[in-house]
């Protein structure tokens, strides 16, 4: 019995990481209907930025992430402003092709700069710290922090979206770009701000990815896949749904691994397919779409 | 100098030309009605002024400045607000959020505030926190007008505000328009309901297939003249 309780708890904690992967993707798709195929590689890029900042300034990963956040905010704004905004507003294909190309460019640039070696963000004693719930079940402090960060980020995104003037502009632009312009909304700037915000979220995701497991320049696409699955399971356009979707994928993976260690990845994908069959629009679809 | 002027305004949708050299003038404080049959180019004309369709800068001038090439967000910031055809409220926003976003790009003091708009349209005050798509057609139109008014525009462009609404609601909307006019806002009104349009406007322009077919003051134009300019037969 305890092994299943343990699998459930570890799955929920892992779901926090997947929700962090997915939140940025969900944000971008929600506002500009842009499917960012480079999202996973951008997370890996952010992990390398944190790694580099930590090495240069001799900081722990948390402090290095704080230093990396403003850099990544600006990079995100610039990427959207200079490149991605040019692909939006017309056909469906250009943004897909451009972000796919970006994914390949980032992966190869990282290989060139950092080689194919696996890296890890070293957090020191916090990595092995845990809180014992019973003699057989314990929660790692880092996974717990991951889930807590996911909760805080989802909450913050909801506050920004539903309680601020900027959030109103985000939602209005998402609803109807043409009419949004009549409100004096400079929509390319709104898109760039949204991407900058998504970069902040994916940099925090990168911190926990780097402390959770090894990463290398080719690890991006798999993170993208988990992020996609979490977004789709949760239902497009709902941040809480994305968190829930991440947890479902996480729990499916850990319980699958409990049955047979080879089934971990498979179980996550099966759970995704089951949700798609039962509720094609996801568990918490936004009412209007 | 007129407040708003179009000179040889032309507009295209791809290869299709919708407007062929429209010259119009709006003086400060005036209400001008644009009438014409379906497809005459009335909505295109409003979109060209609002910046949703862009052309040569000199084709539209506002307060002496050429704005024909300006983006919609820029035009709005200068003080021209459009109430679009079909209301086009933002579905993700509540009624009040729809009003508030109207001053996103231009938040200047003037006769119109949230409270004044609720006083102008009492029915929407009680529904301020409802999802905008759950409002009735008339209430939605009130929100759409309020959303444009809240930026205290100098020119209000109204596209078919009576479309699909019950006569009693249309009367309420046109009564509100009198208050808007009295507050000093200049208005361009696109309307298929000629009788309604003539009643509130100082001058009329009639469009026919993208060209100006008649202009004048309501009292000076005969029914036959308007009929001929409207239908072309």
Image (spheres, rainbow, N blue to C red):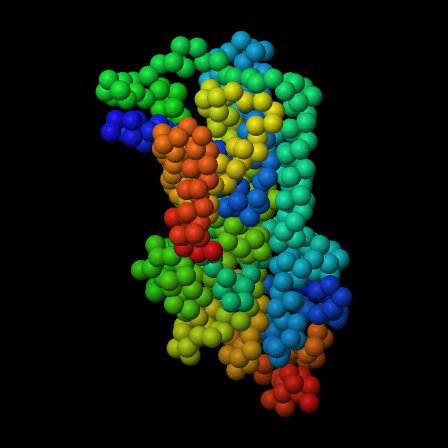
Q: How many marks?
A: 0
Q: Is residue B119 visible?
A: no
Residue B30 x, y percent position in the rendering:
57, 68
Q: Quadrant of the N terminus of chain B?
A: bottom right
Say which residue appears at 51% left-offset and 11% top-offset. Answer: A59
A58 in relation to B98, above or below: above
Residue A139 x, y percent position in the rendering:
32, 22
B155 in relation to B178, above or below: above
Say which residue appears at 66% left-offset and 72% top-offset. Answer: B41
| A94 vs A82, nearest the viewer | A94
Say which residue appears at 58% left-offset and 68% top-offset. Answer: B188
A136 in relation to A248, above or below: above
Residue B60 x, y percent position in the rendering:
70, 60
| B75 vs B24, nearest the viewer | B75
Say which residue appears at 57% left-offset and 34% top-offset. Answer: A221
| A98 vs B227, nearest the viewer | A98
Q: Quadrant of residue B13?
A: bottom right
Left/right placement of residue B93 relative to residue B2 reads left
Residue A61 x, y percent position in the rendering:
49, 16
Q: Quadrant of the C terminus of chain B?
A: bottom right
Left/right placement of residue B24 relative to residue B188 reads right
Left/right placement of residue A106 relative to residue A249 reads right
| B26 vs A269, nearest the viewer | A269
Q: Quadrant of residue B209?
A: bottom right
Q: Is residue A54 visible?
A: yes
């Amino acid at each position: 019995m305890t092994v299943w309780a343990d699998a459930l708890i570890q799955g929920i904690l892992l779901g926090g990481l997947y929700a962090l992967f997915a939140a940025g993707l969900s944000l971008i798709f929600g506002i500009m209907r842009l499917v960012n195929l480079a999202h996973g590689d951008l997370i890996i890029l952010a992990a390398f930025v944190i790694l580099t900042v930590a090495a240069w300034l001799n900081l722990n990963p948390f402090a290095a992430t704080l230093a990396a956040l403003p850099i990544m905010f600006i990079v995100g704004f610039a990427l959207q402003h200079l490149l991605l905004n040019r692909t939006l507003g017309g056909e469906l294909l250009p943004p897909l092709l451009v972000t796919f190309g970006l994914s390949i460019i980032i992966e190869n640039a990282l290989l060139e700069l950092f080689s194919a070696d696996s890296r890890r963000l070293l957090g020191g004693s916090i990595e092995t710290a845990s809180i014992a719930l019973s003699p057989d079940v314990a929660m790692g402090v880092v996974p717990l922090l991951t889930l807590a960060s996911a909760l805080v980020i989802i909450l913050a995104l909801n506050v920004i979206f539903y309680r601020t003037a900027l959030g109103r502009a985000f939602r209005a632009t998402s609803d109807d770009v043409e009419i949004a312009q009549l409100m004096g909304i400079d929509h390319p700037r709104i898109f760039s701000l949204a991407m900058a915000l998504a970069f902040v979220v994916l940099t925090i995701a990168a911190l926990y990815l780097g402390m959770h497991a090894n990463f290398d320049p080719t690890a991006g696409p798999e993170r993208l896949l988990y992020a996609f699955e979490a977004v789709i399971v949760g239902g497009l356009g709902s941040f809480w749904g994305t968190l829930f979707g991440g947890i479902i994928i996480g729990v499916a993976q850990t319980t699958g691994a409990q049955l047979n260690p080879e089934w971990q990845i498979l179980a996550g994908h099966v759970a995704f397919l089951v949700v798609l069959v039962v509720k094609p629009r996801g568990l918490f679809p936004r009412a209007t779409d | 100098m007129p407040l708003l002027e179009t000179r040889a305004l032309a507009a295209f949708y791809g290869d299709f030309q919708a407007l062929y050299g429209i010259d119009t003038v709006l003086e400060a404080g005036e209400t001008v009605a644009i009438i014409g049959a379906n497809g005459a180019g009335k909505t295109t004309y409003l979109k060209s002024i609002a910046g949703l369709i862009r052309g040569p800068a000199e084709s539209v001038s506002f307060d002496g400045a050429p704005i024909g090439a300006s983006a919609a967000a820029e035009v709005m910031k200068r003080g021209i607000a459009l109430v679009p055809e079909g209301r086009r409220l933002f579905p993700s926003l509540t009624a009040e959020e729809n009003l508030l976003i109207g001053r996103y790009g231009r938040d200047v003091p003037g006769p119109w505030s949230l409270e004044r708009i609720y006083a102008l349209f009492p029915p929407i005050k009680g529904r301020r926190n409802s999802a905008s798509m759950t409002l009735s057609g008339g209430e939605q139109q009130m929100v759409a007008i309020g959303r444009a008014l809240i930026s205290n525009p100098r020119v209000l462009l109204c596209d078919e505000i009576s479309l699909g609404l019950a006569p009693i609601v249309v009367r309420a909307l046109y009564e509100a328009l009198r208050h808007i006019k009295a507050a000093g806002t200049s208005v361009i009104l696109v309307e298929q309901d000629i009788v309604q349009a003539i009643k509130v406007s100082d001058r009329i322009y009639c469009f026919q297939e993208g060209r100006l077919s008649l202009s004048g003051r309501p009292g000076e134009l005969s029914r036959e003249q308007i009929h001929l300019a409207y239908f072309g037969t």
